[in-house]
Image (cartoon, rainbow, N blue to C red):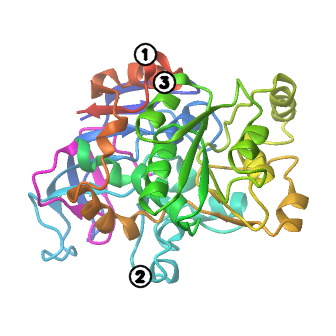
Amino acid sequence: MRANTWSGRNKVEVRDVPDPRILNRRDAIVRITSTAICGSDLHLVDGYIPTMQDGDVMGHEFMGEVVEVGAGVDPGRLRVGDRVVVPFPIACGACGACAAELYSCCENSNPNAGIAEKMFGHPVAGIFGYSHLTGGFAGGQAEYARVPFADVGPIKIESDLTDEQVLFLSDILPTGYMGAEMCDIRSSDVVAVWGAGPVGQFAMDSARLLGAAKVIAIDKEPYRLELAERAGHLPVNFEEVDVRSRLLELTGGRGPDKCIDAVGLEATHGSAHVAAYDRVKQAVRSETERPHALRQAILSCRSGGVVSVIGVYGGLLDKFPAGAWMNRSLTLRTGQCHVQRYMEPLLRRIENGELDPTRIITHTLPLEEADRGFELFKNKQDNCEKVVLKP
Protein backbone atom coordinates (compact mmCIF):
# COMPACT_ATOMS: atom_id res chain seq x y z
CA MET A 1 0.00 0.00 0.00
CA ARG A 2 0.98 3.66 -0.20
CA ALA A 3 1.79 5.58 2.97
CA ASN A 4 3.39 8.82 4.06
CA THR A 5 6.60 8.04 5.93
CA TRP A 6 9.20 9.83 8.03
CA SER A 7 12.38 10.04 5.97
CA GLY A 8 14.61 12.07 8.25
CA ARG A 9 14.45 15.47 9.86
CA ASN A 10 12.37 17.92 7.80
CA LYS A 11 11.48 15.25 5.25
CA VAL A 12 8.49 13.00 4.60
CA GLU A 13 8.00 10.67 1.62
CA VAL A 14 5.03 8.77 0.24
CA ARG A 15 6.25 5.28 -0.56
CA ASP A 16 5.18 1.65 -0.85
CA VAL A 17 5.04 -0.16 2.50
CA PRO A 18 3.72 -3.61 3.48
CA ASP A 19 -0.03 -3.92 3.95
CA PRO A 20 -1.05 -4.17 7.61
CA ARG A 21 -2.36 -7.49 8.89
CA ILE A 22 -4.13 -8.82 11.96
CA LEU A 23 -1.54 -9.56 14.67
CA ASN A 24 -3.76 -9.95 17.73
CA ARG A 25 -7.29 -11.16 18.33
CA ARG A 26 -8.60 -7.68 19.15
CA ASP A 27 -7.14 -6.01 16.04
CA ALA A 28 -9.03 -4.56 13.11
CA ILE A 29 -7.86 -3.37 9.70
CA VAL A 30 -9.33 -0.08 8.51
CA ARG A 31 -9.34 1.13 4.91
CA ILE A 32 -8.68 4.82 5.35
CA THR A 33 -10.96 7.30 3.63
CA SER A 34 -9.68 10.51 5.25
CA THR A 35 -6.67 11.44 7.35
CA ALA A 36 -5.07 14.71 8.40
CA ILE A 37 -1.82 16.47 9.23
CA CYS A 38 -1.61 17.54 12.87
CA GLY A 39 0.57 20.16 14.50
CA SER A 40 2.01 17.35 16.63
CA ASP A 41 3.31 15.74 13.43
CA LEU A 42 5.54 18.76 12.97
CA HIS A 43 7.32 17.95 16.25
CA LEU A 44 8.33 14.64 14.64
CA VAL A 45 9.40 16.20 11.37
CA ASP A 46 11.28 18.98 13.13
CA GLY A 47 13.23 16.43 15.18
CA TYR A 48 11.96 17.25 18.67
CA ILE A 49 10.51 13.80 19.42
CA PRO A 50 13.17 11.05 19.58
CA THR A 51 13.10 7.43 18.35
CA MET A 52 11.69 8.08 14.87
CA GLN A 53 13.08 5.73 12.22
CA ASP A 54 13.31 5.99 8.45
CA GLY A 55 10.14 4.50 6.95
CA ASP A 56 7.88 4.99 9.98
CA VAL A 57 4.32 5.65 8.79
CA MET A 58 3.08 9.05 9.96
CA GLY A 59 -0.30 10.25 11.14
CA HIS A 60 -2.67 9.81 14.07
CA GLU A 61 -5.87 11.44 12.79
CA PHE A 62 -7.77 9.06 10.54
CA MET A 63 -11.05 7.34 9.78
CA GLY A 64 -12.42 4.84 7.31
CA GLU A 65 -14.14 1.50 6.80
CA VAL A 66 -13.45 -1.69 8.73
CA VAL A 67 -12.36 -4.38 6.25
CA GLU A 68 -11.16 -7.10 8.65
CA VAL A 69 -11.51 -7.90 12.35
CA GLY A 70 -9.69 -10.27 14.67
CA ALA A 71 -11.42 -13.26 16.23
CA GLY A 72 -11.54 -11.56 19.63
CA VAL A 73 -13.46 -8.47 18.51
CA ASP A 74 -17.08 -8.56 19.73
CA PRO A 75 -19.27 -8.37 16.59
CA GLY A 76 -21.77 -6.42 18.64
CA ARG A 77 -19.22 -3.62 18.90
CA LEU A 78 -17.46 -3.71 15.54
CA ARG A 79 -18.06 -5.48 12.23
CA VAL A 80 -16.63 -5.50 8.74
CA GLY A 81 -18.25 -2.65 6.83
CA ASP A 82 -18.57 -0.30 9.81
CA ARG A 83 -17.57 3.31 9.20
CA VAL A 84 -15.36 4.44 12.07
CA VAL A 85 -13.24 7.26 13.45
CA VAL A 86 -10.13 6.03 15.26
CA PRO A 87 -8.84 7.87 18.39
CA PHE A 88 -5.12 8.63 18.45
CA PRO A 89 -4.33 7.05 21.87
CA ILE A 90 -4.43 3.25 21.86
CA ALA A 91 -6.16 1.98 24.98
CA CYS A 92 -6.79 -1.52 26.30
CA GLY A 93 -9.98 -0.62 28.16
CA ALA A 94 -9.11 -2.83 31.13
CA CYS A 95 -6.21 -1.32 33.12
CA GLY A 96 -6.51 1.09 36.04
CA ALA A 97 -5.99 4.13 33.86
CA CYS A 98 -8.64 3.06 31.35
CA ALA A 99 -11.06 2.27 34.18
CA ALA A 100 -10.62 5.90 35.28
CA GLU A 101 -11.15 7.05 31.65
CA LEU A 102 -7.53 8.23 31.48
CA TYR A 103 -7.10 6.53 28.12
CA SER A 104 -3.92 8.36 27.07
CA CYS A 105 -2.26 6.90 30.18
CA CYS A 106 -3.19 3.28 29.32
CA GLU A 107 -0.81 0.88 31.06
CA ASN A 108 -0.98 -1.94 28.51
CA SER A 109 -0.99 -0.52 24.98
CA ASN A 110 2.62 0.64 24.60
CA PRO A 111 5.09 -2.21 24.00
CA ASN A 112 7.93 0.28 24.47
CA ALA A 113 6.68 1.57 27.81
CA GLY A 114 10.16 1.26 29.30
CA ILE A 115 11.51 3.88 26.89
CA ALA A 116 8.68 6.26 27.77
CA GLU A 117 9.19 5.65 31.47
CA LYS A 118 12.83 6.74 31.22
CA MET A 119 11.76 9.99 29.56
CA PHE A 120 8.57 10.81 31.47
CA GLY A 121 9.02 8.88 34.72
CA HIS A 122 6.03 6.68 33.92
CA PRO A 123 4.76 4.74 30.90
CA VAL A 124 2.40 6.40 28.42
CA ALA A 125 -0.13 4.84 26.07
CA GLY A 126 0.61 3.74 22.55
CA ILE A 127 -0.06 6.33 19.87
CA PHE A 128 -0.49 5.82 16.14
CA GLY A 129 2.35 7.14 14.00
CA TYR A 130 4.14 8.87 16.84
CA SER A 131 7.61 7.37 17.24
CA HIS A 132 8.87 4.22 18.92
CA LEU A 133 8.66 6.07 22.23
CA THR A 134 4.90 5.51 22.03
CA GLY A 135 5.03 1.99 20.62
CA GLY A 136 6.20 2.30 17.03
CA PHE A 137 2.68 1.78 15.69
CA ALA A 138 2.18 2.56 12.00
CA GLY A 139 0.09 5.68 11.54
CA GLY A 140 -2.93 6.61 9.51
CA GLN A 141 -1.51 8.69 6.66
CA ALA A 142 -1.87 5.59 4.55
CA GLU A 143 -4.33 3.51 2.59
CA TYR A 144 -4.86 1.03 5.45
CA ALA A 145 -4.08 0.85 9.17
CA ARG A 146 -4.02 -1.83 11.83
CA VAL A 147 -6.03 -0.77 14.88
CA PRO A 148 -5.18 -2.62 18.13
CA PHE A 149 -7.87 -2.96 20.81
CA ALA A 150 -10.42 -2.18 18.10
CA ASP A 151 -13.32 -2.97 20.44
CA VAL A 152 -12.28 -0.09 22.72
CA GLY A 153 -11.13 2.71 20.42
CA PRO A 154 -13.06 3.38 17.23
CA ILE A 155 -16.46 5.05 17.24
CA LYS A 156 -19.00 4.00 14.61
CA ILE A 157 -20.50 6.72 12.43
CA GLU A 158 -23.99 5.60 11.55
CA SER A 159 -25.36 8.88 10.19
CA ASP A 160 -24.76 10.56 6.85
CA LEU A 161 -22.30 13.10 8.26
CA THR A 162 -19.35 13.68 5.93
CA ASP A 163 -15.82 12.58 6.75
CA GLU A 164 -14.88 16.22 7.19
CA GLN A 165 -17.55 16.68 9.88
CA VAL A 166 -16.34 13.79 12.04
CA LEU A 167 -12.66 13.19 11.18
CA PHE A 168 -11.39 15.48 13.93
CA LEU A 169 -13.06 13.38 16.61
CA SER A 170 -9.82 11.39 16.29
CA ASP A 171 -7.78 14.04 18.11
CA ILE A 172 -7.99 17.79 17.79
CA LEU A 173 -11.67 18.35 18.57
CA PRO A 174 -11.60 16.29 21.80
CA THR A 175 -8.22 17.82 22.66
CA GLY A 176 -9.55 21.36 22.32
CA TYR A 177 -12.70 20.43 24.24
CA MET A 178 -10.73 18.80 27.06
CA GLY A 179 -8.59 21.92 27.31
CA ALA A 180 -11.72 24.00 27.87
CA GLU A 181 -13.35 21.43 30.15
CA MET A 182 -10.30 21.38 32.44
CA CYS A 183 -10.90 25.11 33.02
CA ASP A 184 -14.18 24.59 34.93
CA ILE A 185 -15.66 27.48 32.98
CA ARG A 186 -18.29 29.74 34.55
CA SER A 187 -20.60 32.12 32.74
CA SER A 188 -18.62 35.19 33.84
CA ASP A 189 -15.23 33.83 32.75
CA VAL A 190 -12.84 35.41 30.30
CA VAL A 191 -10.84 32.62 28.64
CA ALA A 192 -7.57 33.33 26.82
CA VAL A 193 -6.23 30.76 24.36
CA TRP A 194 -2.60 30.80 23.24
CA GLY A 195 -2.39 29.44 19.69
CA ALA A 196 -5.01 29.88 16.97
CA GLY A 197 -4.07 26.72 15.12
CA PRO A 198 -6.61 23.89 14.77
CA VAL A 199 -6.49 22.77 18.42
CA GLY A 200 -6.62 26.34 19.65
CA GLN A 201 -9.62 27.10 17.43
CA PHE A 202 -11.50 24.12 18.87
CA ALA A 203 -10.49 25.10 22.41
CA MET A 204 -12.00 28.53 21.74
CA ASP A 205 -15.20 27.08 20.30
CA SER A 206 -15.46 24.69 23.24
CA ALA A 207 -14.90 27.43 25.81
CA ARG A 208 -17.76 29.40 24.28
CA LEU A 209 -19.92 26.26 24.13
CA LEU A 210 -19.25 25.68 27.83
CA GLY A 211 -20.47 29.19 28.64
CA ALA A 212 -17.48 31.56 28.69
CA ALA A 213 -18.40 35.23 28.62
CA LYS A 214 -15.47 36.14 26.36
CA VAL A 215 -12.82 34.15 24.50
CA ILE A 216 -9.51 35.71 23.46
CA ALA A 217 -7.36 34.27 20.66
CA ILE A 218 -3.58 34.89 20.87
CA ASP A 219 -1.39 34.28 17.82
CA LYS A 220 0.80 36.14 15.33
CA GLU A 221 -0.63 34.90 12.03
CA PRO A 222 -3.27 37.32 10.70
CA TYR A 223 -5.21 34.63 8.84
CA ARG A 224 -5.48 32.49 11.98
CA LEU A 225 -6.64 35.45 14.04
CA GLU A 226 -9.16 36.35 11.32
CA LEU A 227 -10.47 32.77 11.41
CA ALA A 228 -10.93 33.07 15.17
CA GLU A 229 -12.56 36.47 14.86
CA ARG A 230 -15.05 35.17 12.28
CA ALA A 231 -16.03 32.56 14.84
CA GLY A 232 -16.74 35.28 17.39
CA HIS A 233 -13.48 35.32 19.36
CA LEU A 234 -11.41 38.40 20.19
CA PRO A 235 -7.97 38.45 18.45
CA VAL A 236 -4.66 39.54 20.00
CA ASN A 237 -1.50 39.58 17.85
CA PHE A 238 1.54 38.99 20.06
CA GLU A 239 3.89 40.58 17.52
CA GLU A 240 1.94 43.85 17.68
CA VAL A 241 1.21 44.25 21.39
CA ASP A 242 2.53 43.10 24.74
CA VAL A 243 0.21 40.22 25.47
CA ARG A 244 0.07 40.51 29.25
CA SER A 245 -0.59 44.25 29.10
CA ARG A 246 -3.33 43.77 26.53
CA LEU A 247 -4.95 41.02 28.57
CA LEU A 248 -4.95 43.22 31.66
CA GLU A 249 -6.64 45.97 29.64
CA LEU A 250 -9.32 43.54 28.47
CA THR A 251 -10.00 42.21 31.98
CA GLY A 252 -10.04 45.29 34.19
CA GLY A 253 -6.49 44.71 35.40
CA ARG A 254 -7.11 41.20 36.78
CA GLY A 255 -6.05 38.93 33.92
CA PRO A 256 -8.07 36.17 32.25
CA ASP A 257 -9.93 33.82 34.59
CA LYS A 258 -8.82 30.78 32.58
CA CYS A 259 -5.84 30.37 30.24
CA ILE A 260 -5.27 27.59 27.71
CA ASP A 261 -1.86 26.78 26.20
CA ALA A 262 -2.64 25.21 22.82
CA VAL A 263 0.89 25.79 21.49
CA GLY A 264 3.37 23.51 23.22
CA LEU A 265 7.08 23.01 22.81
CA GLU A 266 7.71 24.93 19.56
CA ALA A 267 6.31 28.27 20.69
CA THR A 268 7.59 31.55 19.27
CA HIS A 269 7.79 34.91 21.03
CA GLY A 270 7.22 38.47 19.90
CA SER A 271 10.43 39.65 21.60
CA ALA A 272 13.59 38.73 19.70
CA HIS A 273 15.81 38.54 22.79
CA VAL A 274 13.37 36.27 24.65
CA ALA A 275 13.08 34.02 21.61
CA ALA A 276 16.88 33.93 21.28
CA TYR A 277 17.29 32.87 24.92
CA ASP A 278 15.41 29.60 24.44
CA ARG A 279 17.04 28.87 21.08
CA VAL A 280 20.45 29.16 22.71
CA LYS A 281 19.34 26.89 25.55
CA GLN A 282 18.18 24.35 22.99
CA ALA A 283 21.41 24.63 21.02
CA VAL A 284 23.51 23.73 24.06
CA ARG A 285 21.10 20.90 24.93
CA SER A 286 20.08 22.35 28.31
CA GLU A 287 16.39 22.39 27.39
CA THR A 288 14.25 20.78 24.71
CA GLU A 289 11.22 23.08 24.76
CA ARG A 290 10.43 26.69 23.91
CA PRO A 291 7.82 27.36 26.60
CA HIS A 292 6.94 30.97 25.75
CA ALA A 293 3.18 30.36 25.69
CA LEU A 294 3.19 28.41 28.94
CA ARG A 295 5.20 31.06 30.80
CA GLN A 296 2.97 33.81 29.44
CA ALA A 297 -0.23 31.97 30.37
CA ILE A 298 0.94 31.46 33.96
CA LEU A 299 2.06 35.08 34.33
CA SER A 300 -1.11 36.46 32.73
CA CYS A 301 -3.76 34.38 34.50
CA ARG A 302 -5.63 36.06 37.35
CA SER A 303 -4.87 34.93 40.88
CA GLY A 304 -6.84 31.80 41.70
CA GLY A 305 -7.37 31.01 38.02
CA VAL A 306 -6.75 27.88 35.98
CA VAL A 307 -4.04 27.26 33.39
CA SER A 308 -4.92 24.36 31.08
CA VAL A 309 -2.11 22.90 28.98
CA ILE A 310 -2.97 20.87 25.87
CA GLY A 311 -0.01 21.87 23.71
CA VAL A 312 2.46 18.99 23.47
CA TYR A 313 5.61 19.01 25.61
CA GLY A 314 8.21 16.27 25.41
CA GLY A 315 11.17 16.98 27.64
CA LEU A 316 12.69 19.73 29.78
CA LEU A 317 12.16 23.49 29.91
CA ASP A 318 13.87 26.39 31.64
CA LYS A 319 12.60 29.40 33.60
CA PHE A 320 9.31 27.84 34.67
CA PRO A 321 7.55 30.59 36.72
CA ALA A 322 6.98 28.42 39.79
CA GLY A 323 6.72 31.45 42.07
CA ALA A 324 3.78 32.93 40.15
CA TRP A 325 2.13 29.51 39.95
CA MET A 326 2.40 28.75 43.65
CA ASN A 327 2.02 32.15 45.27
CA ARG A 328 -1.02 33.21 43.26
CA SER A 329 -2.94 29.96 43.88
CA LEU A 330 -3.06 28.94 40.23
CA THR A 331 -4.34 25.52 39.24
CA LEU A 332 -2.33 23.83 36.46
CA ARG A 333 -4.07 21.03 34.54
CA THR A 334 -2.77 19.12 31.58
CA GLY A 335 -2.60 15.84 29.69
CA GLN A 336 -2.66 14.13 26.35
CA CYS A 337 -6.33 13.94 25.47
CA HIS A 338 -8.36 10.97 26.69
CA VAL A 339 -10.11 10.92 23.34
CA GLN A 340 -12.32 7.87 23.89
CA ARG A 341 -14.04 9.71 26.75
CA TYR A 342 -15.21 12.53 24.49
CA MET A 343 -16.00 10.98 21.11
CA GLU A 344 -19.64 10.07 21.73
CA PRO A 345 -20.75 13.34 23.39
CA LEU A 346 -18.93 15.45 20.81
CA LEU A 347 -20.47 13.44 17.97
CA ARG A 348 -23.87 14.33 19.42
CA ARG A 349 -22.92 18.01 19.52
CA ILE A 350 -21.86 17.87 15.86
CA GLU A 351 -25.12 16.16 14.93
CA ASN A 352 -27.05 18.87 16.84
CA GLY A 353 -25.21 21.65 15.01
CA GLU A 354 -23.50 22.97 18.16
CA LEU A 355 -20.01 22.52 16.66
CA ASP A 356 -18.79 22.85 13.06
CA PRO A 357 -15.40 21.13 12.77
CA THR A 358 -15.23 21.82 9.03
CA ARG A 359 -14.63 25.53 9.59
CA ILE A 360 -10.87 25.01 10.05
CA ILE A 361 -10.24 22.98 6.86
CA THR A 362 -8.35 25.04 4.30
CA HIS A 363 -6.68 22.40 2.13
CA THR A 364 -7.69 18.95 0.90
CA LEU A 365 -5.02 17.01 -0.96
CA PRO A 366 -4.48 13.46 -2.22
CA LEU A 367 -2.25 11.31 -0.02
CA GLU A 368 0.40 11.34 -2.76
CA GLU A 369 0.85 15.08 -2.10
CA ALA A 370 1.48 14.66 1.64
CA ASP A 371 4.92 16.27 1.37
CA ARG A 372 3.32 19.37 -0.14
CA GLY A 373 0.72 19.35 2.64
CA PHE A 374 3.46 19.31 5.27
CA GLU A 375 5.24 22.17 3.50
CA LEU A 376 2.06 24.26 3.40
CA PHE A 377 1.17 23.56 7.01
CA LYS A 378 4.61 23.90 8.55
CA ASN A 379 5.47 27.14 6.78
CA LYS A 380 1.94 28.56 7.00
CA GLN A 381 1.78 29.03 3.25
CA ASP A 382 -1.41 29.90 1.39
CA ASN A 383 -3.15 30.67 4.72
CA CYS A 384 -2.99 26.98 5.60
CA GLU A 385 -4.86 26.12 8.80
CA LYS A 386 -5.63 22.41 8.39
CA VAL A 387 -4.79 19.84 5.72
CA VAL A 388 -6.97 16.79 5.06
CA LEU A 389 -5.42 13.99 2.99
CA LYS A 390 -7.40 11.56 0.85
CA PRO A 391 -5.80 8.13 0.20
Disc on res. 94 = 2
The residue under label 2 is which amino acid type? Ala
Look at the picture and state if 221 lies above or below 247. Answer: above
Image location of residue 101, percent across then percent down: 46, 76
Name the residue nearer the viewer: 279 or 309.
309
Mark pair 3, 1: CA separation: 10 Å
Disc 1: which residue: 382
The residue under label 1 is which amino acid type? Asp
Q: Quadrant of residue 254?
A: bottom right
Disc on res. 289 = none
Q: Quadrant of residue 183?
A: bottom right
Residue at position x 61%, y 55% in the image: 190
Residue at position x 55%, y 66% in the image: 185
The residue under label 3 is which amino acid type? Tyr
Name the residue nearer the viewer: 249 or 58.
249
Residue at position x 18%, y 77% in the image: 74
